[in-house]
Amino acid sequence: MKGFLENEQGAVSLYLILIIVPIFLFCAVFIDFARIKAAEKESENAVKTGLRSALSAFNRDLHSYGLYALNPDMEQSADLFHSVVTNNLSGHLAHSSFKYIDTTLKPESERLIAMYSLANHDVLKRQMVEEMKYRAPIMYGLEITDAFKSSGAAERMKSAARFAANAEKAEALLKERDRWLDTAWDNFVNIHTKAGTDYPFYETNLERLNELSGRIGTHTVEEVRQSINDGKQQLQRLKDSVENIDDSLSSLARAGANAYEAVKSLLETRDALANQINELTTKLAEWEQLLNDLLEYAKLLTALKLKSTNDYTALTEMNDKFNEALVKAGKANDELNSELKRIEAENAGDPLGANAIFQNLHVIGKPDLDDYTSQVAATVSLFGGLKSQLQAVVFFTTEQYNSTSETNREYYSKANSLYAEQSRKEAARNRNQDHAERSRREQRTKAQPFLDQAVKAMGSCSIVSAGDSFQPLYEALQGDPAKGGTGYFQAYMEMNGESSVVEIMDEVKLDNADHAGQSAMKLLDKLGDLVQEARDDMYINEFALSKFNYRTYGLEKDNAGNVRQTVDLSDPASHPLSNQEVEFMIYGSNSCAGNYSKAYAEMFAIRLGIRTLEALMEPRNEVLNAGSPLLVLLAAVAEGVMAAQTDMVKLLDGQAVPLSDKIGQTFTLHYKDYLRLFLLLHGRDKVMLSRMQALLQLNTGIDLRQKATYVQGSLTSTVRLWFLPGLMRAIRSVGVHDCIPAGNRCEIHKTAYMAY
């Protein structure tokens, strides 16, 4: 019994050992695991706290622009990071009581690495968006977008730009049509002139040919020549006979014989022969004349046949040139008529008064041109009939004379009647052309003095300074090509992987009314699209306008005429590039005058476009009736340029100018508001950001490439293991913790990233 009890107690002890040992091992592992996890969290928090502390030492100069970057150098930031990390690990703190964990920093294991400076466009853009995302939508929406949309100005701008484009195309087709019509008319005038020369020539020679034909009858040259030869031989025989009689008479007279009867007979014979000689001589003269008439007839008929062939060839060539010109005129006319139909459909419901000009244009129907072509062809064809009749002549009869003479008269009459009919049309068309051209010259002359004044005002920088006092600043910004150096702008472009060669913007031309009108309408067209679909980079634009200065900074007046007070931490008024920074961002010229002139030109063009639009809304009747779309536009430009010049004086003085008194609800814009529009028009992201970075470096003296905004921190900490390091090493392979056992301590590596 006793032995049985002892065996039973031993079994219980073994059973208890088997139960308690695993529980102990589990508790030991769980306790160290919990301590490791707590140390990992503490190490992670220490790294992040160290990063936040390092970032808290930001640059005050850049902060005034709403930008954040590390202020001290990296060595100082690393010292601050080390100090904060050390003081946030429990192993480095003095405790009077029990410490659950003793996390300590492994010597020289902490690292602070700076990444992504403000020289990076993406970083800079993100910070600017953060600075402006609450302010920019309100400013932009209230001052620009809503005003343009609610007033209907955007649609009116598109309408005016559309009219200008339509007017330019219609005017070009109108000129093209009229140019070829002029060429066709010149060729028909040549035909008419030739008809005036041909008619009397052929009329005279046909009459002569008919006269000769009546004389010669059915005789031929060979027949007449044979008759002449026979007559001459007979005449010679008669003369010989007379000579023989004369010899006989002489012989009788010498003989003295009484031969009265013989002499008398010989004399009678001689008289008869003399009469025959006279008759034959007369006949020979007639035959000679007949031969001359025959030769003249043949020569004249041959000449008429040859000349008619040459004349018909010349008329055909003239007609071909006429047809070629009229075909091109017809093509331009068809395109013009199609364009007018398209414009009419496009402008349906458009209240712009200037569109009425497209109904007042001189329209020529295709049947009119076809009739013109057929009438000229008929004129040439009539002469072709005359030529054919002459070519068919062998013996010119009275009937042929009557027929050819009638054809000649019809040819001449047709040329004259068509000339009289068409010359009236051409005279009316030329009067309209001349009137329109004179009117266009008058409008150009009227506008030119104001454009000259605008061009003269463009290059001035006298508002802020005289001379080239800003040139050294621009050399720092842009570099001096003559010296082979690069400026801040090129450096920032190259750092961001961009070419420093900037695409040239479209030039606003104000040298004459035509160019000024085209430039103004193009800008209106762009603005019409722009204000309806604002781009995301408006935040950057508002950042530029609020942190930097421009031409009228500090001069802008409110409705009461008082100068507006502007307060910003960046203090734009104190910047070295006075009153021209935003203009430099937009245009990038190497001088104050260069940037001012481009801003002035575009602003003047917009004001000219608005004032031109106002004139196009209610054009004068005499302009509409002239039948020239370009004249309507030029008249509006001439009227608008005077008002635009007055507007520019007010804008440069800091005053607000109403967008328009005739377009919807009136709202006013300052010089700054137009710069806002130009920033949207020309805001080429990479270029403008690089110029802004160059200005920041110029104003603060800080190389943004050295100012980090993103840092990486890392450390290795250790915590002492209380139980079984080997077992902790074994369970690490399962992936439940990242601690690496090293002796009786465990190493923890933590890395964190943080940015402004």
Image (cartoon, rainbow, N blue to C red):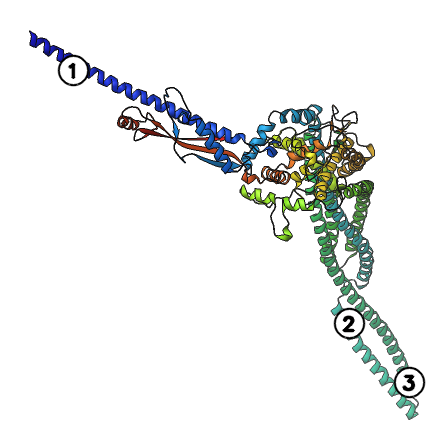
Q: Is residue 562 visible?
A: yes
Q: Are marks 2 and 1 in contact (CB under 8 Å)?
A: no
x, y percent for residue 545:
66, 32
Between the residue at mark 2 and the residue at mark 1, the CA separation in whole angstroms equals 175 Å
Q: Position of residue 419 (x, y in %)?
A: 80, 46
Residue under label 1, please give it: 14
Disc 3 vs disc 1: Cβ atoms closer than 8 Å? no
Above or below 150: residue 122: below
* Disc 3 element: helix
Q: In the image, which is nearer the foreground, mark 2 or mark 1?
A: 1
Whether residue 367 is visible to the viewer of this picture, yes or no, is no
Amino acid at pointer 2:
Ser
- Residue 181 on image: x %, y %: 74, 45
Residue 364, compared with residue 387, is above or below; it is above
Count the numbered circles shown.
3
Of residues 716 and 264, the one drawn nearer to the viewer in this rendering: 716
Of label 2 and label 1, which has the lower sequence position?
A: 1
Q: Nearer the viewer, mark 3 or mark 2?
A: 2
Query: Residue at horizontal 71%, vertical 53%?
Result: 316
Would you say the residues marked 3 and 2 are in contact, meaning their CB atoms lie under 8 Å apart?
A: no
User: What is the three-letter code of the residue carrying label 1?
Assistant: Leu
Q: Is residue 393 above or below residue 755?
A: below
The mark nearer the N terminus, 3 or 1, is 1
Q: Relative to the observer, which residue lies in front, 109 or 240?
A: 109
Amino acid type of disc 3? Val
Residue at mark 2: 227
Q: Label 3 belongs to which residue? A: 263
Q: Quadrant of residue 612?
A: top right
Secondary element at image label 2? helix
> From the viewer's perspective, is 738 left or right of 13?
right
